[in-house]
Amino acid sequence: MPKAAPSPSGARSGRFAFLVAAGIFLSRVSGLIRDRVFAHYFGLSEAADAFKAALRIPNFLQNLFGEGVLSASFIPVYANLLAREDEEEARRTAGAVAALLALSTSILVLIGVVATPYFIDAIAPGFHGEKRELTIHIVRILFPGAGLLVISAWCLGVLNSHRRVFLSYTAPVIWNVAMIGAMWRFGGRYAQYPLALIVAWGSVVGSALQVGVQLPIVLRLLHGLRLSLNHQTENVRTILRNFGPVFVSRGVVQISAYVDGFLASYLPTGAVAALANAQTLYLLPVSLFGMSVSAAELPQMSGAIGDESEVAAVLRERLNAGLRQIAFFVVPSVAAFLVLGDVIVGAIYQTGQFHHADVLYVWGILAGSTVGLLASTLGRLYSSTYYALRDTRTPLRFAIIRVALTTVLGYLCALPLPRLLGIDPRWGVAGLTISAGAASWIEFTLLRLTLNRRIGLTGVAKSYLAKVWGAALAAAAVGWLIHHFYQHHSPILAAVLVLTPYGLVYFAATLAMRLGEAQAFLGFAVRRMAASKGTSKD
């Protein structure tokens, strides 16, 4: 019989996925509050463009060395050592990875601070004058904070492997709170340009605090930290071998994001900030559902023990179950963004300098993002399955194909196409998100077909997708009717009046269809409520 030893049961795995999702939810909610406060003080101004563009550059460092790369290279090896109860070797491996990571990150931070003007020329050549100078100053402030966030990602890898997932995914809340505090404290006293610099310093302080809340527990789990630059042990060499392809893969994906920023910098003022606002909302279901399921499953898949057929059976079973969970939540997210996106964008961003016309602009960009939302989230779990198989090169090849397509299609849809269609050039940003979505579907298809040849048939049944799409579209129709007849409420009240019935109708419809995910979610909610009542009585 196939087995994954020693690993939690399916129920415990579901609990880990819930805790990851809960942590990500709190983190994302705090991020949305941060963006709302930011929109209040900056709107879609030149300072907003500069800050959003600047944030991308040090984030490149964080994303290259951060959570995604460590999840793919470090966690499979470290979690497998824990599964085999070789805690001493696990501690040595974690210490070596921490030391190598700290050294390489420090060097890159120093290079980044010195070379910032060249980065600006490369990623935002459309910025000039004071806008360009402000972007340079912000980037130089943010780079050290990005280095700290890389260490935070290492902490996340250790905590996840020890099933301490809630803390690791809620830690970014403190980063957002630090930036919110900076804007709240100084927003009414400074103009936009100096305020942007203050917010950047708030980001650095938040990065330090994010590491600080995780490190004590990590040190306790490791029984101290044995830093070492010894990279000759078998496990460290395995991590480094896996690290290379994933590093390049993440770099390729980041290049795609920078191509979007590069092209958006040539579009009218506000395009860069509007793209960033839409991406924040687009990434919410990706993080909540794609990342939570993938993060919970990767240690479980990595601990699978048996011969090749037994391991394949474990992976196939876990993958198919995870794909259904993701589709259950992401399909209604796509329908909501597409049909009710103005309600969602208005509730988050419409305040102060961010007006209703800006809401419609961001909604258009967000609607373009829905093209590839399901493919992106399902693709994350497929990539995690490859990583569990210690195969980091196959996802890299397909990521390169995706980025090449995104670059070519993005250029055509963002710059020449609006002119050919005779529409406002600023809508070229929506062309960027649509073209990226098309490329995501191609990458997902390649990932699935190749993996199916290795472990057997995987995927979400068409009948299941038809049911969740039917429920989501029916719920969206109800939400649209309510919004149509009650349009004159405040944005937040409108969101409550529209999105609450939307969610209830979708959940009721999927329960009526007896979908297992809906029934499991209801059962989990009932158990949690009963447990909370029992606790309160005690």
Image (cartoon, grey):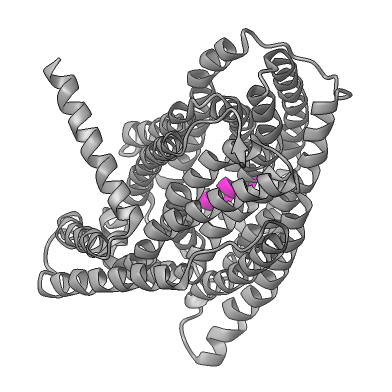
In the rendered view, does 212 fall on the left or right side of 225?
left
For the residue pair 254 and 455, the one nearer the viewer reads as 455
In the rendered view, does 108 fall on the left or right side of 70?
right
Asked if the stretch drawn in magenta spans residue 199, the answer is: no
In which quadrant of the rendered image does the N terminus lie? Answer: top right
- The vertical placement of 355 against 325, above or below, is below
Residue at horizontal 69 percent and vertical 75 percent from the top: 408
- The vertical placement of 515 against 93, above or below, is below
- The vertical placement of 491 against 340, above or below, is above
Residue at horizontal 56 percent and vertical 46 percent from the top: 55
Q: Is residue 135 visible?
A: no
Residue at horizontal 46 percent and vertical 73 percent from the top: 462
Q: Is residue 49 visible?
A: yes
Quarter assignment of residue 361 = bottom left
Query: x and y percent of residue 385 in the render?
Result: 64, 49
Q: Residue furthest top?
A: 223
Query: x and y percent of residue 8 in the render?
Result: 50, 31
Which portion, as a residue range, is magenta? 52-57
Q: Residue furthest right?
A: 232
For the residue pair 446 and 248, the one nearer the viewer reads as 446
Query: x and y percent of residue 255 in the render?
Result: 69, 57
For the residue pair 66 and 441, the one nearer the viewer reads as 441
- The vertical placement of 475 against 290, above or below, is below
Secondary structure mostly seen in the magenta stretch: helix
Quarter assignment of residue 472 = bottom left
